[in-house]
Amino acid sequence: MVDPKNSTLLEEKHIAEICMVYVLYFDEAQGHIPLLIFPDDKYKEDKKFMRPIKYHSIWFLSSDDLSALDHIDLEYKGFTYFGKKILTKSKRKKRRAGLEEETPETIVIIVSLPNDIEIFGDGLIRKLTETIQDKYDEQLYKIIESEIAKEQIIKTEKIKTCIQEGTEIKEELRTLITEITEDYFDTVIKQKDATSIKQQKAISFLSLIGHDVSHIISGVSDFSFSNIKLFDPSKTDKTELAVKAPLSISSIHIIEDSKELEIIVENKTDKEYNNVRVKITHVKEFFEKEIMDQLIDIWFQQEELLFISPILPHISEYLFFIIDDKNKDKLLSKRIDINLLT
Amino acid sequence: MQEEDDEYVDKNEIIIRNYRTSDYQATLEILRQLHDTYDIGLNEQRWKESSGLRQFKPNLKRITLIAEYKLNGEVVGMGMLEAVKNNLGQYIGYLDNWATKKEYIGKRVGEILAKRAIYILKSWGCESVRINIGYNADKKLINVIGKVGFNPILIVLEKKITDED
């Protein structure tokens, strides 16, 4: 049991292990400067944390280069850094000739997640960027002014007011980031395919670092290491009432004679499926290798289909996917461990 | 001539559909009848509920077609078709376990099934369709099949593997 006195520290430690958010700007005099780091600004001084942030390729790409990409990612020492660059309004007097007060501020938002849960990065960076741009487009330059003003040795009343105003906006922004992050992790797992390999990998990782994921089994948890609720118990009813999967595995078994894996899948709906792709793969030496890639042109309503895959020597885990070939939506995915089949 | 036409089942009276697990018993009965006549080597233990399902495995596609009499929903015929990819990358279609319920033999149920089968095999990219028939098969049967364009091209020699091998 965790000592409640230390719970804040633990909570912060766990959040930092799961997710960090960096809001930075490009200073015309000093370069890449952090404005705010979530969960704590103390990481500003930590070279280990700041190295990939300062040299992230997001800084070196222009807005034109970025127009075709949603975000730029950097993998570094077990973490993925999702970077996004935005321009926001400014009335700040710039410190380089040729730049107007109205020249927009270059803001970079970076979200870092351990590689094991990088599946969540795409949605989180998009949500953070959209909200920050929407709510703070006209205020971020005030935080920048405030940070620059803090460096002044003599602080006049005007400077003090500037610092105070900037600090207040910064704290509001921190609260907003906290809320977005918590809300995101609160709901995201349910929205995605709970049986996907990446998802299972993410859950394993969170469990391993001591994050409470017991909600998924028990439904109710009185105590949690952090207030990020990955599986919100209050929403379990909705899950139960959710529409049943259109395709479902009726049976999986091994044909001993021929050393084959037999998977029967039923289209449980009253409609035909067209152009559905079925894939069976396995992982060998970190690479996913394909055994079957089958396009089903028509899958009749209520029809069961039989998929047979050879069982390969020394390979016990197989991945089974059904994908809509047109929009690439995953209709079904299942990890099959033949050692667990009776 | 009129009398002969009356004996044939109209193609509109037959529904050709894919096999369902609920067809297991009916198909087993038909296969038993076929086995009794031609000794097709039916092993009832191996004809499972899932055996006739549309099947996909690397380099093989298989479907079992069912001919259902529209009026009463009776399963009156069945046939399995397979598309097998050979070493040259070509798909060859095979018609297997082609059988009609005794009471419907000679009423062109098999022909209706075969036409649909060839249409499906063509859509799967097959360049030819083969039927395996026993070496000592009835000549009449070979003539019937020959009339719809099947000609002998191969002689397959088989040796049973025994414990002494």
Image (spheres, rainbow, N blue to C red):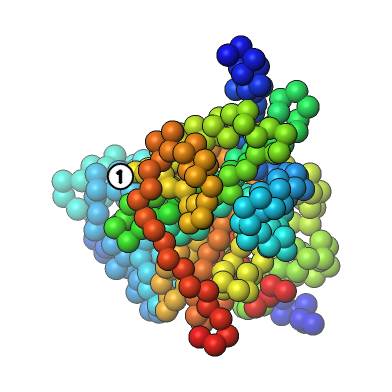
- Is residue B90 toward the left or the right of residue A243 in the image? left
Q: Is residue A329 visible?
A: no
Task: Residue at the far left: name it.
Answer: A98
Residue A230 found in image quarter: bottom right
Q: Is residue A215 visible?
A: yes
Give the residue at x 50% y 80%: A313
Residue B15 at what x, y percent from top left? 64, 28
Disc 1: which residue: A68
On screen, A264 above or below A42?
A: above
Provide the chain ID for the residue under circle 1: A
Foreground residue among B74 and A213: B74
Residue B2 found in image quarter: top right
Which class describes the residues within 10 Å of circle 1: few (<14), some (14-19), or many (20+)?
Answer: few
Foreground residue among A231 and A149: A231
- Is residue B121 toward the left or the right of residue A267 in the image? left
On screen, A197 above or below A242?
A: below
* The C terminus of chain A lies in quadrant: bottom right
Q: Amino acid at mark 1?
A: Ala
* The N terminus of chain A lies in quadrant: bottom right
Give the residue at x 37% y 55%: B154
Q: Regarding mark 1 in the picture, which secondary structure is present there? A: loop
- Is residue A8 toward the left or the right of residue A117 in the image? right
- Is residue A214 toward the left or the right of residue B146 in the image? right
Foreground residue among A125 and A261: A261
Residue A221 at what x, y percent from top left? 81, 66
Residue A172 at what x, y percent from top left? 57, 52
Residue B17 at what x, y percent from top left? 62, 35
Task: Residue at the far top: name it.
Answer: B2
